Image (spheres, helix red, strand yellow):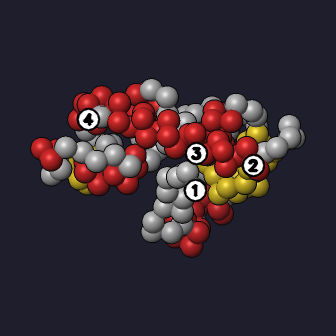
């Protein structure tokens, strides 16, 4: 979220990370934004109803982007402590599309390389993230076949990092 600068950034975050449930929960969990009482019980499936998603992203765009601005500022304070010099930094993650790598590059305005279990080639990557390297061949490897097992072992049922606050 700290990399959001406009409504397209917000909407693009749903390309791979979809949601089905209450709008209230989606906006609270993903954006740290409380919806108005009249919208609390609206159900949304972001994969099947893009028009409804666009409607509410536009409606709450100012609040979402304000939260993004606050979080980006706090995130940059943290990143500036870690990335003190201009080195070639590498990011390591399970993979596939480099969304974290892309967001870090946008926030910090520098290039990184990504080392992944499996990395999608440029022609299969909706985000076109450069300098991604995978240990296993995308979509044909053991890792891809059993990715759901890896995800269940390495992913918590809650966010591992939720909202960057001043302290």
Estimate how packed mark 1 is, as few (under 14), some (14 to 19) or many (20 or more) residues with alpha carbons within 10 Å: few
Query: Is residue 38 found left or right of 122 in the rendered image?
Result: left
Q: Earlier in the sequence, mark 3 or mark 2?
A: 3
- Depth check, mark 4 against mark 2: the one in front is 2
Secondary element at tag 2: helix
Q: Position of residue 6 (x, y in %)?
A: 45, 26
Q: Position of residue 150 (x, y in %)?
A: 59, 68
Secondary element at tag 4: helix
Name the residue: 76% across, 34% down: 111
Cα distance between the residues tagged 3 and 2: 11 Å
Q: Is residue 138 above or below residue 85?
A: below
Residue contact at pointers 4 and 1, CB within 8 angstroms: no
Cα distance between the residues tagged 4 and 1: 31 Å
Estimate how packed mark 4 is, as few (under 14), some (14 to 19) or many (20 or more) residues with alpha carbons within 10 Å: some
Q: Is residue 70 above or below residue 78?
A: above
Residue occupied by mark 2: 81
Residue contact at pointers 3 and 1, CB within 8 angstroms: no
Secondary element at tag 1: loop
Name the residue: 42% across, 35% down: 66
Disc ID at residue 74:
3
Q: Earlier in the sequence, mark 1 or mark 2?
A: 2
Q: Position of residue 37 (x, y in %)?
A: 15, 47
Cα distance between the residues tagged 3 and 1: 8 Å
On the question of residue 99 being in view, the answer is no
Cα distance between the residues tagged 4 and 2: 36 Å
Disc ID at residue 56:
4
């Amino acid at each position: 979220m700290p990399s959001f600068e406009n409504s397209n950034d917000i909407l693009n975050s749903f390309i791979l990370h979809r949601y089905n449930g209450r709008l209230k929960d989606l906006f609270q969990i993903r954006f740290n934004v409380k919806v108005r009482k009249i919208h609390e019980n609206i159900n949304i499936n972001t994969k099947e109803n893009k028009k409804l998603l666009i409607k509410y992203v536009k409606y709450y765009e100012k609040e979402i982007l304000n939260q993004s601005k606050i979080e980006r500022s706090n995130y940059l304070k943290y990143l500036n402590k870690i990335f003190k010099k201009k080195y070639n930094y590498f990011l390591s993650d399970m993979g596939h599309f480099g969304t974290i790598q892309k967001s870090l590059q946008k926030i910090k305005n520098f290039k990184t390389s990504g080392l992944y279990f499996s990395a999608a080639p440029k022609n299969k990557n909706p985000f076109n993230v450069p300098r991604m390297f995978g240990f296993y061949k995308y979509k044909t490897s053991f890792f891809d076949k059993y990715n759901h097992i890896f995800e269940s072992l390495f992913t918590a049922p809650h966010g591992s990092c939720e909202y960057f606050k001043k302290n």
